Each structure stands twice: as structure tokens, then as C-alpha cells.
Image (cartoon, rainbow, N blue to C red):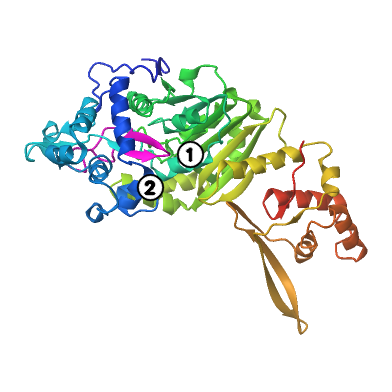
Amino acid sequence: MSNGERTISAARPPEVAPGERMPIRIGSAEEFSRVRDFLRAAGFDENAVLAALKISDLSQIPEADTASVDTGSGSPALLALIDLLVLGNVIAADDFRARCGDAALAAFTALDLIRDAHDFPPLEKLAAGSIVCPVWLYPVDRFFIMSDRRTDLKDNASRLGTEVVFPAHDFGTLQLLRLLPPSIGSGNALDLCGGSGIGALHLARSGMSATTADITARSTYFAAFNARLNGIEIEVVRGDLYSPIADRRFDVICAHPPWVPSSGDAMVFRDGGETGEAIVQRVFCEMPHHLRDHGTAVVVSLGRDGNDGRYENRVRRWLGEEGRDCDVILGVDKMLSIDDVVGSVRRLHLENDAAKAERMAARFRELGTRHFVYGAVFVRRTGAEVTEPPLRLRMSSRATADDFERVFAWRRYRRRADFADWLAEARPRLSPQLEANVRYVVREGTMVADSTVFSVGRPLSATVQPDVWTARLLEQLKGEQTVVRTFDAARQSAQVPAEFTLPMFVDLVGKMIERGFLEIELPAW
């Protein structure tokens, strides 16, 4: 089959090729409705799972201590669901029936969400009447989502094949969901490398017409199942990245692509080529052809800072000539060394093969890798050529799309022809979250300020080390006096070097506002 042949509406089941067997069955709307209604009635939601498993974040589910479940945190039916669907334990059918009822057992069985444990060879020695859920089913982002487990049936069965549907409670996926644009009520969206379809479901709930795309048959099947389970209509397409959507353009594109450097065992959901960037690079290279004017793209991934440029600058190059009107902001979650990345791959995917790990590290060094960056790249189509360089900011776990939207808006204002004149007459003020650390030294018997470090711990944080005289000048911006008057007063009192001009100060103030050190009321342009 050539790339991009299949387009599936979630209203009808995707085709399954001969020999392909899926672990669950796409049934009728009524069958899905019965399962959905029971999950809701039982209180099967994120807070309930967090409380029962005594964890603070859904990404911690794989490490939850199944032996210390809080049995007092929910009803017998809820605890049975968590035991069977989330933890993947084998339980007695009679126990499930007693706690959840015959109707629930029948509803789950109709979709193959409950199977006889004896259907799976590793479990054939269990007592008769044992049941198991062959997939991972959990609440996330106010949806019920199904994906593959890391290994089939709690490590009792053989390892999964290469076409694994990635869990939607993964840290990176949860981060992507927090960073997706808020409800806009219209437009269309594309969820690339969609896996379970969670990105498309999130965007469809906001009122957009959403499409999820993935290269594997298993992922498209699971995405269609999840859409029907949640009663939400999305389009599911199968193919290599953008190929199944041809020349269509979108208001929002999101992606959490495979970014782990390939270790030779060809896991489709995980491997990103030799350096981990093969798929990420293609996502950006082809993006301008599919991102509509004034549209936004969000890509959560690992990237490299190398001798050929920082990650965000390399993204700008990948966007190419067609993407010259794209503004780029990188939110950095983690900075990782070559040893950090190779060590993680060695532990998780190389079975601690030291020789393979060293070859991978050597290749990274050959490519001029300085370190790796994990975070979110935002791309905004502006409609006009963007000449300023991409922006890099530190991103906390509290960062949302609104935080990045504020920065994009400010960068858009800065491109106006009359911006400098407006800012010169504006009255910015110090951010209440700004911290200034001053280092003093003794010179000729007197304690004097030698250096200053500004930092701001907002959801998008930043640190800068201005000259001491620059810090003192900026400290005078308290919202009471215009930028030009502040500069004139400093010039008259000889607080600034002679070569430091008003346009230079206005530009500095603009950059400090962009990074959150100063605040200002934005005009209604």
C-alpha cells in the first residue's frame, strides 16, 4: 500500500488487512455508549486514579506501587476498573461481576475490553474464570483513552511488536496537551504522529475539525476506537507524516514525534533515526506547505544544539524559504548532555550494551553535538517575513499556550513600523516576579557592585546578566515615567555611557518585556 491511501472517519471502523488482528473490537455506537456511561457513573476519572494509586501525575502510572492501592479512595466498582484497566491485573470474572454488575461485564466484553485470560498463552495456568484487559485504558484530559502497555499483560506475555500505540499519559503527551491553543471554536487541526488520537480529540473538543495521522494501522485503529469511546467525531488518516492529507492546510498542527536515537530494533512509535531528529526535521521541513497563514504549530520533541547552530535556529532553517514568515519560539524543559541521552537509551533500549552506547555517543560527537534540548517548539505563521532570530525561553511545568501567546503577541507588536515611537512613550514596570542578585566586591577599600543577575521564575522563565549600570537604569522603570524620560534623566546625570542611545535603550526595554523582566499594558492594535 502506498503512503496516504487510507482515510477513515471515526464514525465507521477502519479496515483491517488480512492477518492483522487487533486486541479490541470496534462495535456499535450503542455498545460504546454503554461502556462510556458505566465509566462515568463509576467515577473513573483522573482524580480518582491519582488518589487510588497515590501518585501526583498521570505520567507516574507505570511506576505506581500496585501493592499499596488506597482501597478506601473509591467504590468497589471504581477500584475494580482501576485494577483491571489501569494496572492490568488479572481478576476473577465473578469478582468483577459482583462489583460492577452483569451489564457492565457484558458491555466491556462486547468490545473485547474484557477477555478470558486463557486466550493468552502466558496466562493459561490461571484459574478458570479469570479475565484480563488486553490493552491499557485510563482517563486523561477528561477522555477515556486506550493504548498499548509497555509489555503485553503486565510482563507475563511476550513483548509487543514494533507498531506500539504510545500511551497518552506519557509526560511529553501531557505536556503537549497543556500547550495546545485554547478553544477557538472553529478552524481545522492536524495531529501528526497521532498514536492514540488524543491530540485530535483535544482539539475537536475545542470546536475544531480535527484530523489525526499516523503511519501504522494499529494506531489508526486505536484512534478510531478512542474517538467512538468518547463520542467525538474526528478524521483518522494513515500514512507517512503529511502524505495522507495531500495539499490541505490547517490552522493548528501539533506533533509529539518519535525522537529517540535509533538503536537498531525498529520501534516505529519511538525511533527518530540515527540522531533522533530524522522525523522531527521532516515535520518542520514540510510544515510551511500545510500551516495556514496565522496558524500555529506545537511540536514536543528532543533536539540538538550543535556546532551548526542551536536547535531553534536549525528549526528555522528546516522551515526553508516557504517558511520565511514563520516566527519560532522554543520552550526548554530540560537540557541534556550526550552522556544523559546515551545513558537513557542504553538502559531502556540497548539492554546495557556498552559498545553500542559508545558508538552512539561517538556519532553524536562527530556531528558536533554540544548538548540536547527537550521541550516544545512553537511556530506561528505571521503573513510577513520574520527577520528577528528565534527566541529560546525556559519552560516550567506550569507553562500553557497562553504564556506563549503573550510572547507571540509582543513579538508581533515589535514588528510594527511605529512600535519604537510607541514604546518610547510607554510606561513599563518591573515584573513582580523579577529577582535581582547583585555581587559586591571591595575596590580600593570600598564595597562596590561588580555584577548583577536578573531572573524571573514565571511559567516561561529567563535569566540575564546585564551590566551594573544597565541594571540600575532598568530598575527605574516603575510604571510612573516613560522610557524616553527615564533615558533623558539618566543621560543628564551621566548614568549611561555616551555611546548608549535612546534607540538602543528602547530596543533593550523591548527585549526585557519579551523575556518577562518588565511588564506593560499591550495596546489594542
* SS label for mark 1: helix
Would you place residue 179 above or below residue 430 in this image? above
Residue 21: tell me if it is visible.
yes
Residue where numbered disc 1 is placed = 177
Q: Residues within 10 Å of mark 2 (few under 14, many from 20)?
A: some
* SS label for mark 2: helix
Query: Magenta part of the protein: which range?
Result: 138-163
Sequence-first tag of 1 and 2: 2
**What residue do we see at 33% from left, 47% from top?**
49
Question: Residue 47 shows which numbered tag?
Answer: 2
Would you place residue 149 above or below residue 25 in this image? below
- Magenta run includes residue 148: yes
Q: On the rendered image, what quadrant is the N terminus found in?
A: top left
Main SS of residues in magenta: loop
**What residue do we see at 33% from left, 55% from top?**
54
Q: Quadrant of residue 400?
A: top right
Please, which residue is most extreme toward the bottom here? 445
* Residue type pointed to by label 2: Asn
Left or right? Give the position of 511 relative to 54. right
* Residue type pointed to by label 1: Leu
Q: Position of residue 111 (x, y in %)?
A: 24, 26
Q: CA distance from mark 1 to mark 2?
A: 17 Å
Q: Quadrant of residue 107?
A: top left
Would you place residue 143 above or below residue 29 in this image? below
Q: Position of residue 324 (x, y in %)?
A: 67, 30
Left or right? Give the position of 162 relative to 490. left
Q: Position of residue 293 (x, y in %)?
A: 65, 25
Q: Position of residue 428 (x, y in %)?
A: 77, 53
